[in-house]
Every structure is written in structure tokens, then in C-alpha cells.
Image (tube, rainbow, N blue to C red):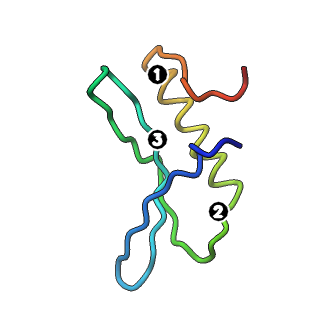
Amino acid sequence: MKSYFRVEFLAEAEEKKIRLFAFWDKEKPIDTVVIATHGIVKKTSRIPGKEIDKAIRLRTKYFKSKGKADENDESG
């Protein structure tokens, strides 16, 4: 797994830390959209593999729906 999959935002809500998974879609040379796929309550410093897989699946689905190749696709 490459480092760009480990992008996360942490927010505190009601004394719980929330981990949001996100990726970037660079529309134009100066315009970038940040898409948050989902979030989980942070319980440990380790990121569960199934949550990373979910973020990758959602990112791939997003780019396919736009008819655009996923620039960070690891499959080839």
C-alpha cells in the first residue's frame, strides 16, 4: 500500500476521535476537490485493513463514475 492511502483527518467530537478517510481529485491545474469516503471512531493508532480497502473501493468507484482513470490505482 502506498502512503497516499494513509491520508486521514482527525476530529474530536464528544470526547471521541473520528478518523476520516479521504482522497484528492485534481480537476484542473489549480482546482482540487477533497472527497471524504467515510469515517470511523479512532480506537487505536493502527488503521484496520478493511477500512483502507473500503476507502480504496469507494475512490475507485468515484473515478469510474466520472469516466476517469484513478490516478493512484495500484492495479497497473
Looking at this view, is 53 or 45 the one in front? 45
Which mark is first along the chain, 1 or 3? 3
Q: Position of residue 14 (x, y in %)?
A: 35, 83
Mark 1 element type: helix
Mark 1 or mark 2, earlier in chain = 2
What is the total number of numbered labels drawn onto the structure image? 3
Please, which residue is most extreme toward the left here? Answer: 30
Could you tell me which residue is drawn at 47 percent across and 30 percent down?
62
Q: Amino acid at mark 3?
A: Phe
Please give the name of the residue rendered at 58% of the width and 52% of the height, measured from the top-left corner: 6
Farthest-out residue, top: 67
Instruction: Give the residue displayed 27% in from the left and 26% down from the top.
Output: 30
**Image position of 21 with respect to 47: above or below:** above
Residue 17 location in percent, x, y? 45, 75
The percent coordinates of residue 11 (x first, y second) are 38, 69
Q: Which mark is residue 54?
A: none
Considering the numbered disc 3 on the image, is that residue within a helix, a strand or a loop? strand
Q: Residues within 10 Å of mark 2 (few under 14, many from 20)?
A: few
Look at mark 3 in the image and give the residue it sits on.
23
**Residue receiving disc 2:** 47
Which mark's residue is nearer the viewer, 3 or 1? 3
| Pair 1/2: label in front | 2
Q: CA distance from mark 1 to mark 2?
A: 27 Å
The label number, if any, that marks residue 65 in the structure image = 1
Residue type at the position of mark 1: Ser
- Give the answer, above or below, for where 45 lies relative to 62: below
Query: Looking at the image, which residue is at 49% across and 56% down?
Result: 8
